[in-house]
Image (tube, rainbow, N blue to C red):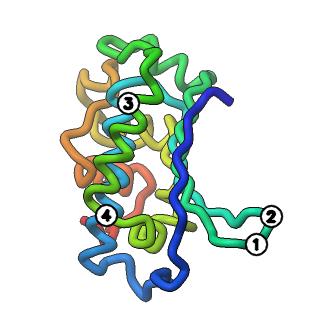
Amino acid sequence: MPGVKSEFVLRTDLLTVPASIAEPRLRIAGLAWLDMVLELFSQEVLSVVYLRWSRPFDGKEPFLELELDSSKNFRTKKLLALPDAPSTTVHRRKRFDDAVAKLMARTSPEDLWAAVANQRLARIGALEIVQAWGAKSRGSSLKDYYPRFDDSREFLFYLMDAFKTPMHPWL
């Protein structure tokens, strides 16, 4: 799978399963995650960006993993054919590292885990981008162009619309 990954040790003493992801610090973390994903999709047609956590075989401290998959499939090939679609680039690692650095400047791995891990938004792929774009561009000529969103809130609003979900705690 062509992609890049970053890992962060999770401090288990700081991990909590939140009663609500609407808490301000978790809202900030979640929207920062979506901002990073949108930034990466604006720079290159991607298959998916993941956030997940794992514990190594030795059972020691868990890791938060952020991963970008740039493999191409039928959905990404359709996106590549659209006007003003970004071209595939060879600077993927640097762009990913820069985006992750911006993300981590806004939140901590533990807050990001609490806000995003184990929920639907932990995996944003071409499908979600296309679905949100379809909701935004419904009935307009925008549908024939590469998906662009002003910010994470706009993306989240249209994604919720596409999935017929009335609201999200980060909106």
Amino acid on which disc 4 is placed: Thr
For residue 123, side relative to residue 155 (left or right): right
Residue assigned mark 4: 107
Position of residue 120 relative to residue 22, above or below, is above
Between the residue at mark 3 and the residue at mark 4, the CA separation in whole angstroms equals 19 Å
- Circle 1 packing at 10 Å, graded few (<14), some (14-19), many (20+), is few
Residue assigned mark 1: 59
* Contact check, label 2 and label 1, Cβ < 8 Å: yes
Give residue 24's quadrant in the image: bottom left
User: Going 44% across and 84% down the picture, which residue do you hit?
Assistant: 18
Between the residue at mark 2 and the residue at mark 1, the CA separation in whole angstroms equals 5 Å
Q: Is residue 152 visible?
A: yes
Residue assigned mark 2: 57
Mark found first going from the N terminus, 3 or 4: 3
Label of residue 95 in the image: 3
Between the residue at mark 4 and the residue at mark 1, the CA separation in whole angstroms equals 26 Å
Residue 90: give x, y in percent of width and height: 47, 15
Mark found first going from the N terminus, 3 or 1: 1
Secondary structure beneath label 4: loop
Secondary structure beneath label 1: loop
Amino acid on which disc 2 is placed: Phe
